[in-house]
Image: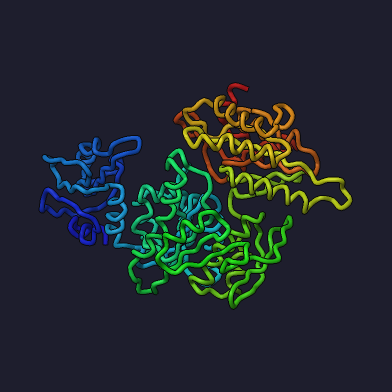
């Protein structure tokens, strides 16, 4: 347990390593950030990314590093240097060793996928709580450790390995027994989730996303599959050695992931060949209801969530709880019912306006598709009896700069087909031209028959885009702002500006209704209105 001698941290290191010294200093911290180095730290120099960590070794040593790990051949350092083959992967195992391998003391449930990860994590978390398990959760929104909720950052995927292992250690120290951990493709590709020793792995879906980083769908899927291939390497645990892969039978990734799993597996879905199925699905403005069924069980489920995709998310969590942890159906149904919603996921903003206003995180073509389909279903469910038609769907969304460019056209195509009005706007343009991004999106809209000024608009400022949507809305319509959800900032250039779509929607609604309310958050595009 930390602080630990350097030799102890390397005692169970699973890869080759080459120390230049027999010195064995005590290590008080493991980090790959030279700015965080303090006296006694082990600094891990990582290659790749925007900077080469080996360049910062002198800074780390001057800041008090007791030893350094890296990939390059180096000599002459004033502290011990250990060469490894892969610094990023080593960081995960060295962090776990430093903290005494906390995952070995916990039952670890990992969730991955393109869309629905955070919602599935929250559903599963509530199921475990309802079953009486002392449970923690690490998601891209926050880390929950007992009554403590820690922000995991503005635009994070899976936190870096030292942070993940630190959170797990806090959970062990707090007496928790189970952890639900949201894992991303970036996290797996960069080894941040290694050494977490998962007992159960769950996938929601694998659709078009992050191809700018991974290069191809096959590479993207391979990163996701590491959750399932890692299950076989998890050591036996004193609290029980559960192993289960949970796959989405309805998703195109099913057959490909099936070949990767060497442990027991279970499938869920809306089709009859899934191990856990949903039947008798009912959607309403209050949420979803369905019958969960499979071999030897059949029970009713109600959730304060919307859309068929959330039926799938419920099934994913339900399958892990029922078939993996053997949780009783009564606790599962109570846990799902206890979840009142997930921040920024189909979250309604209600100031008594005559139409529905929603903020959602949908930022991929598939997520936007299912969100707009759900919006349409909600309008149909709420349509006044005798009305000629349900209200209109008005969507506000953008597409991020320095990310997968194919999404821009694809998302605009989706909105042109499924929304009545699309307002294209900023979403983290970063150092790219916002005008260029919007033109790529507009081209996608035009390619599906969209007419600028009639079915779609380009509004650079996101706050102004929301205002325009509210101005256009008629009684019975549904306005949905997609792409940011729970996130707390938006990036222009290299600067993160404080931004929350929910605050922006409340501000715009307050202005629209003439009520006191929050001020519209500032973005630099406001200076050009």
Q: Is residue 431 above or below residue 297?
A: above
> Horizontal and vertical percent for residue 499?
55, 37
Q: Which residue is painted at 73% across and 51% down in the image? A: 378
Give the side of residue 89 with respect to residue 109, left or right. Answer: left
Q: Is residue 151 above or below residue 107?
A: above
Residue 145 can be seen, yes or no: no
The image quarter containing residue 351 is top right
Where does the N terminus fall, quadrant-wise?
bottom left
Q: How many numbered discs sit on the rendered protein?
A: 0
The image quarter containing residue 289 is bottom right
> Horizontal and vertical percent for residue 470?
72, 36
Q: Which residue is painted at 24% across and 35% down in the image? A: 55
Where does the C terminus fall, quadrant-wise?
top right
Q: Which residue is painted at 79% across and 52% down in the image? A: 382
Pick the front one: 395 or 409 = 409
Single out the residue that lies furthest toward the right: 386
Single out the residue that lies furthest toward the top: 528
Residue 472 can be seen, yes or no: yes
> Horizontal and vertical percent for residue 427?
55, 35
């Amino acid at each position: 347990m930390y602080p630990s001698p350097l030799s102890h941290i390397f005692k169970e290191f699973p890869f080759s390593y080459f120390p230049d010294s027999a010195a064995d200093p005590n290590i008080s911290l493991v980090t790959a950030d030279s700015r965080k180095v303090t006296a006694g730290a082990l600094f891990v120099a990582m290659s790749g990314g925007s900077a080469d960590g080996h360049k910062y070794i002198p800074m780390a040593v001057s800041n008090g590093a007791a030893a350094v790990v890296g990939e390059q051949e180096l000599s002459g350092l004033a502290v011990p240097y250990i060469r490894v083959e892969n610094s990023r992967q080593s960081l995960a195992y060295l962090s776990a060793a430093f903290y005494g391998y906390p995952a070995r003391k916990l039952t670890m449930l990992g969730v991955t996928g393109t869309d629905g990860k955070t919602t599935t994590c929250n559903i599963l978390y509530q199921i475990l709580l309802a079953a009486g398990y002392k449970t923690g959760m690490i998601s891209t929104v926050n880390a929950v450790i007992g009554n403590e909720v820690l922000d995991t950052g503005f635009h994070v995927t899976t936190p870096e390995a030292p942070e993940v292992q630190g959170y797990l250690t806090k959970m062990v120290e707090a007496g928790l027994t189970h952890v639900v951990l949201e894992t991303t493709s970036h996290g797996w590709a960069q080894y941040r989730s290694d050494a977490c020793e998962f007992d159960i792995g769950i996938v929601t879906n694998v659709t078009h996303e992050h191809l700018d980083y991974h290069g191809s769908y096959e590479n993207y899927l391979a990163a996701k599959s590491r959750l399932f291939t890692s299950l076989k390497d998890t050591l036996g645990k004193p609290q029980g050695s559960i192993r289960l892969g949970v796959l989405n039978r309805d998703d195109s990734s099913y057959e490909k992931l099936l070949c990767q799993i060497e442990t027991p597996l279970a499938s869920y879905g809306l089709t009859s060949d899934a191990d856990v199925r949903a039947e008798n699905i009912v959607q309403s403005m209050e949420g979803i209801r369905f019958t969960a069924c499979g071999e030897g069980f059949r029970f009713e489920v109600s959730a304060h969530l919307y859309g068929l995709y959330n039926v799938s998310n419920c099934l994913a969590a339900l399958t892990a709880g029922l078939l993996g942890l053997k949780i009783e159906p009564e606790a599962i149904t109570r846990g799902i019912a206890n979840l009142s919603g997930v921040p920024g996921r189909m979250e309604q903003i209600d100031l008594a306006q005559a139409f529905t206003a929603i903020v959602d995180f949908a930022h991929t073509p598939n997520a936007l598709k299912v969100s707009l389909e759900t919006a349409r279903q909600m309008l149909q469910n709420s349509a006044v009896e005798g009305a000629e038609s349900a209200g209109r769907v008005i969507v506000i969304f953008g597409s991020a700069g320095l990310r997968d460019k194919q999404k821009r056209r694809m998302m605009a195509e989706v909105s042109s087909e499924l929304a009545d009005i699309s307002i294209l706007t900023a979403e983290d343009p970063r150092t790219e031209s916002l005008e260029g991004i919007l033109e790529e999106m507009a081209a996608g809209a035009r390619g599906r028959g969209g007419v600028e000024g009639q079915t779609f608009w380009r509004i650079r400022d996101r706050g102004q885009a929301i205002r325009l949507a509210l101005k256009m809305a008629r009684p019975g319509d549904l306005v949905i702002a997609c792409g940011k959800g729970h996130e707390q900032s938006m990036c222009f250039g290299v600067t993160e500006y404080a931004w929350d779509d929910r605050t922006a929607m409340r501000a715009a609604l307050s202005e629209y209704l003439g009520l006191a309310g929050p001020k519209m958050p500032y973005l630099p595009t406001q200076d050009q209105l």
